[in-house]
Amino acid sequence: MTRKIKVIVKSANLELIGELYNTNTADKVWEALPFESTVNTWGEEIYFDIPVTLNLEPGARAKVEIGEIGYWDVGKSMCIFWGRTPASRDNQPIAASPVNVFGKMNGDPKVLKSVKDGDEILVEQF
């Protein structure tokens, strides 16, 4: 079964769909849905607190692909990457520290450029 999530940023009038991988992190995030939070930005990444507490899994990594969804254990946050971050050396997104990559956004995640610090975000099962 493919598990999909809907990410809604009302103030930016955005709705994005993502697919979750078959990982423990994805299972825990799925079970916690729906949740609301407040967005933080870090370069071309958004991240926000979620009601999930996990450790890093084997395979956690800082170098991620555009559109990937990660769980950052340091901030208990969900991260969505669409380009350069302050840790990047080129256009490859680099997380602040390793994350559990547990999904990928469908479509063009660069639409997240319009999202600002403090925007309210809702994530739900789709």
Image (tube, grey):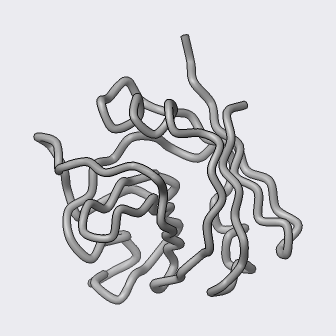
Left or right, 105 with respect to 108, comes to left
At 39% from the left and 82% from the top, the residue drawn is 85
In this rendering, the answer to whether 18 lies above or below 67 is above
- Residue 113 occupies quadrant: bottom right
Left or right, 103 with respect to 90, comes to right
In this rendering, the answer to whether 111 lies above or below 44 is above
- Residue 34 occupies quadrant: top right
Which residue of the protein is positioned furthest toward the top in this rendering? Answer: 1
| Residue 48 horizontal/vertical position (percent) | 51, 68
At 67% from the left and 33% from the top, the residue drawn is 125
At 39% from the left and 34% from the top, the residue drawn is 28
Q: Quadrant of the C terminus?
A: top right
At 59% from the left and 39% from the top, the residue drawn is 33
Q: Quadrant of the N terminus?
A: top right
- Residue 91 occupies quadrant: bottom left
**Towards the viewer: 94 or 3:** 3
**Towards the viewer: 86 or 38:** 38
| Residue 29 horizontal/vertical position (percent) | 46, 40
Left or right, 65 with respect to 99, comes to right
| Residue 57 horizontal/vertical position (percent) | 16, 42
In this rendering, the answer to whether 124 lies above or below 87 is above
